[in-house]
Image: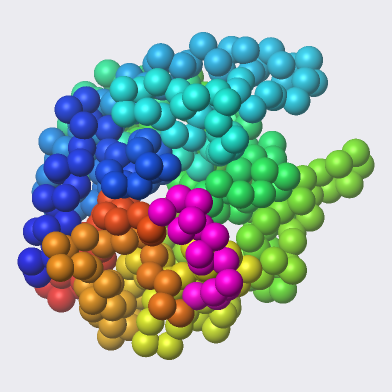
Amino acid sequence: MTDLFTKSIKIILEHQAENGAYVASPSFTNYLFCWLRDGSYIAYAMDQAGQHASAEGFYRWVNQTIARHAYKVDQLEQQLAEQVPPAELSVLHTRFLLNGDEEDPESKWGHFQIDGYGTWLWGLCNHVRMTGNYGLLREFRESINCSIRYLKLTWQLPNYDCWEEHPEYIHPYSLAAVYGGFKEVADLVEAGIYQDCPYPVAEYAAELKSYLMQYAVGDGRFVKHIAPAVGKKTPQPLVAPGVDASLMGFSVPYQVVEPANPLFTRTLAEMQKNLVRADGGVYRYKADTYYGGGEWLLLSAWLGWCYTVTGNIAEAERLLRWVERCADADGNLPEQVTAHPLAAGKYQEWVDAWGKVASPLLWSHAMYIILSVELKNAYS
């Protein structure tokens, strides 16, 4: 393992709060929160690196945070029963202050984003498998079951995607994350390991997968958005926005489909054609304008993870080395690099509004750790 691997672990540990929360980026004002999605990937990376106490600390923070805000799910269920669209602040939030408080309700940044709740279930189940600490499942049963209930209520509702955009749509990546959470819990239930689940979570997973295979497919691949059902109209896959790099999650890690599934291989091929810069990294999506739409390190490592799983070790190695070259002199990995932006004219607007690109971004370091470990395992 390289020095950057060791440095990445150190950076994550240094910026984990005493209560277990991982700050998204310690030097970027708008990222001084803990996202369940980012945090779960970071915790998974720490488990992969043998830092199990750090990962457990994060899951304990999630457990406590969900318990604090679980009353909202009762209110949400009542609203939906009365056919009242859920208000933005009536849902469980996507990000929290490090002490577990909700963000300022006046924030214009959207709160309704479900993928993180699926991802924490996925991550927690993997954590207990890796560590054998199955007692956490019973200890966390109320927050686990609250999350399952919440996701069952909300997964067919329009909400923000994983990039905090497009609240008017349903998002296949988000649903893949929810599926991953449901399926991991269902597997533990079936194995008799998790005995405190009052919901038919395996049925929930099967229903969600059926929905994805019916409505998240267009032009022979997975799509970025689904237009929700309106009246008698069924949900509609939206092909026009093009492919999104987050769709890697359909197979790695959430296993909605196997890596060899033609829908997934065609999705990856479309990504390679439109979102991967030759000898460079991975863009989020073709129309990205955030900081000019640069190449994202976490997505580049994620694609390397996919390639490792599918046996394309040479390309996975190339992406690992590219990420390493993006580190600064102190070993910090940024969110994105903008030397080859998709929308150069938009870069300065974001710098003027928010400052320089976030660095270090803990999620970037986490995905680098994951790819490093996956490649090491592929060699052994």
* In magenta segment, residue 21: no
**What x and y, as percent, mark residue 212?**
64, 53
- Along the line of sight, the residue nearer the viewer: 80 or 278: 278
User: Left of 156 or right of it: where is 111?
Assistant: left
Answer whether residue 281 is visible to the viewer in this image.
yes
- Looking at the rendered image, the quarter that the C terminus falls into is bottom left
User: Left of 135 or right of it: where is 226?
Assistant: right
Answer whether residue 91 is visible to the viewer in this image.
no
Residue located at (13% from left, 36% from top)? 53
Residue located at (38% from left, 58% from top)? 356
Q: What kind of secondary structure does the magenta stretch mostly adopt?
A: helix
User: Left of 180 or right of it: where is 111?
Assistant: right
Residue located at (89% from left, 46% from top)? 233
* In magenta segment, residue 353: yes
Residue 65 sits above or below residue 48 on the image: above
**What x and y, as percent, mark residue 266?**
57, 77
User: Left of 115 or right of it: where is 371?
Assistant: left
**What x and y, as percent, mark residue 159?**
64, 40
- Along the line of sight, the residue nearer the viewer: 299 or 74: 299
**What x and y, as percent, mark residue 332?**
21, 60
| Residue at the front extreme of this rendering | 352
Residue 139 sits above or below residue 59 on the image: above
- Looking at the rendered image, the quarter that the N terminus falls into is bottom left
| Extent of the magenta region | 341-355
Residue located at (59% from left, 30% from top)? 152
